[in-house]
Image (cartoon, rainbow, N blue to C red):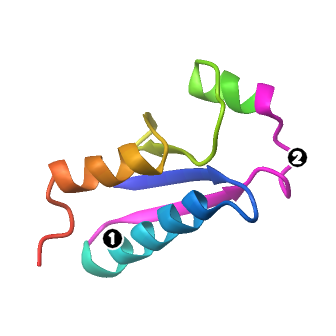
Amino acid sequence: MFVVIFGRPGCPYCVRAKQLADQLEEKMEGFKYRYVDIHAEGISKADLEKTVGKPVETVPQIFVDQTHVGGFTEFDAYVKENELLCA
């Protein structure tokens, strides 16, 4: 599984998404992720909207295996629904 997180500095939900991805990387074999700082990479809101395929109001915007799942809340729900962090 490969996750891409588009975020920005100072965003608490971006931090939480990275923390969740770090947990997954530690506990789940074959899990990898990439965090993309949209400011450092020069990615505009319009660029992000093209990638996502719809208007974007917030970050993070998260993709799981190239499928857009949404922001942190949706990513967290996806992890729970798929029982990816079973103890």
At mark 2, the secondary structure is loop
Q: Quadrant of the C terminus?
A: bottom left
Residue 24: assigned label: 1
> Magenta part of the protein: which range?
29-46
Instruction: From the top left corner, tell me how far across and down residue 17 is, in percent.
Output: 49, 61
Which residue is pictured at 67% across the width and 60% down the height?
11
Dot 1: within a 10 Å radius of its alpha carbon, few (fewer than 14), some, or many (20 or more) residues? some
Which residue is pictured at 34% across the width and 54% down the height?
76
Q: Amino acid at mark 2?
A: Gly
Q: Which residue is mark 2?
A: 42
Q: With respect to residue 36, does 61 lie above or below?
A: above
Q: Quadrant of the N terminus?
A: bottom left
| The quarter of the displayed image where residue 30 is located | bottom left
Q: Residue furthest top?
A: 54
- In this image, 84 relative to 57: left or right? left
Q: How many marks?
A: 2
Alpha carbon of mark 1 to alpha carbon of mark 2: how far? 28 Å
Question: Residue 78 versus residue 13: which sits nearer the camera?
Answer: 13
Instruction: From the top left corner, tell me how far across and down residue 55 is, in percent.
Output: 64, 20
Dot 2: within a 10 Å radius of its alpha carbon, few (fewer than 14), some, or many (20 or more) residues? few
Q: Is residue 47 magenta?
A: no
- In this image, 75 relative to 80: left or right? right
Which residue is pictured at 35% across the width and 65% down the height?
31
Question: Residue 10 versus residue 49: which sits nearer the camera?
Answer: 10
